[in-house]
Amino acid sequence: MNASDRRPICRHVPITGPASRGPCFLPRLVFALRFAIAKPIIPCMNRDILVVTHSGDLHADLVAERLLARDARVFRLNLDQFPAQYQLDIRQIDGAPTGALRHAPSQSEIAMTDIGAIWTRKSGDFRFLSDEDFGPQERAYAIAETHHILTSLLLTANGYWMNHPLASHGAMWKGEQLHRAARFGFRVPPSLTANDGDAVRRFRSAVGGDIIFKPLSSPSLGADEVDAADRIVPNLATTLIAPEHEDMLDALRELPGFFQQYIPKRYELRVTVIGERVFAARIHSQDDERTRTDYRDFSAEIDYVAETLPPEIERRCREFVQSYGLTFGALDLIFTPEGEYVFLENNPAGQFLFVEQLVPELRMLDAVTDCLIDGAHRTG
């Protein structure tokens, strides 16, 4: 058992740590997070658990099974079926929300005053009753208005969050993550953001070795935002810049790119923070050519094993995630041949089921279940 297993499973996390965006945004973000997340704990039993995701989310399926097995009341909001299959009847009287969200096919519902915990697992594209009939402007307005209305309603919920939308939004910027991770004592790779090929060449010369290109917004390169017929490439993994890429560097004039010094690896680590608990898996990415630069090529059969982190590294991971006001985070680290831990990134909504399937002793589905039940019991 790791040291983290002896800690309380969950707790409310105050917002601490450095800012995630510029000086004009910071006061609004910090105020909103402190007001929305650090609410007083009101003891209350048997509150409902709201799971916000999409209909194809296996993580949510398996956690919901565990919640129901423990007699928790669960309401699932599948965003790819909203608002077409849901009915809203929610009022605000003197600022207090009342009413319910109902799933029309099953007639199940959740009252706003009964929400004790909210798990914002994954996003999804909204579905409307007249989807096929909408023109471009109608669709654009429908999406924007539905997003605004739903987000406004969710932000009025007074409960335990995994994760609060404002906290997730503040934690998603990978360039800022590197800055923050260094302040927490992690080694971080030297990085460059540039829209000039010569700047990349100078950076490679300065670091004295290989560099990589890494998409920051999404490895799908926008493919998931366009119709299948309009997709050029499905995705791009972290890529080692080779001589054949030399002429492509001048294409940076079109838009900036992100580059880092390539860090040699003994192995990689996927570290998942759930409440107060820290789960670490060692990934033997260097055992296969396909995963040496980016372990996310799942066609390669490489070993995943449970890892016990040094207490100081475990503490840094936990406190880094909690500094954003998050109760969940999935961090990627490198362990170098010299024995150093190097921070790469944190995903506030990262996948973890694939790790548990490969390392069953890392019982992360149970940990999420524990946190949601404990949070629903302790808050209201």
Image (spheres, rainbow, N blue to C red):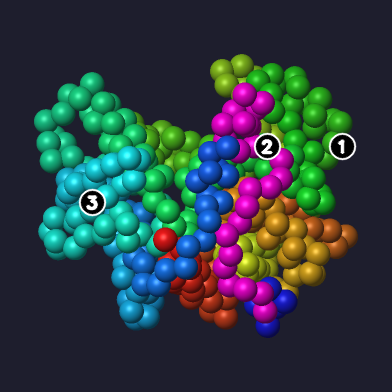
Q: Position of residue 218 (x, y in %)?
A: 51, 40
Give SS at disc 3: strand
Query: Height in image: 284 above or below 209?
Result: below
Q: Which mark is residue 208?
A: 1
Question: Would you name the residue on which mark 3 appears?
Answer: 99
Question: Type of residue at label 2?
Answer: Ala
On-image quarter of the C terminus: bottom left
The mark that comes first in sequence, 1 or 3, is 3
Name the residue located 58 percent from the left edge and 64 percent from the top edge: 11
**Residue density around tag 2, few if under 14, some if 14–19, many if 20 or more, within 10 Å:** some
User: Going by the picture, which residue comes out furthest to the top?
Assistant: 253
**Residue density around tag 1, few if under 14, some if 14–19, many if 20 or more, within 10 Å:** few
Foreground pick, 312 / 350: 312
Q: Mark 2, mark 3: which one is toward the viewer?
A: 3
Q: Position of residue 22 (x, y in %)?
A: 65, 27
Question: Would you name the residue on which mark 2 appears?
Answer: 19
Name the residue located 26 percent from the left edge and 26 percent from the top edge: 141
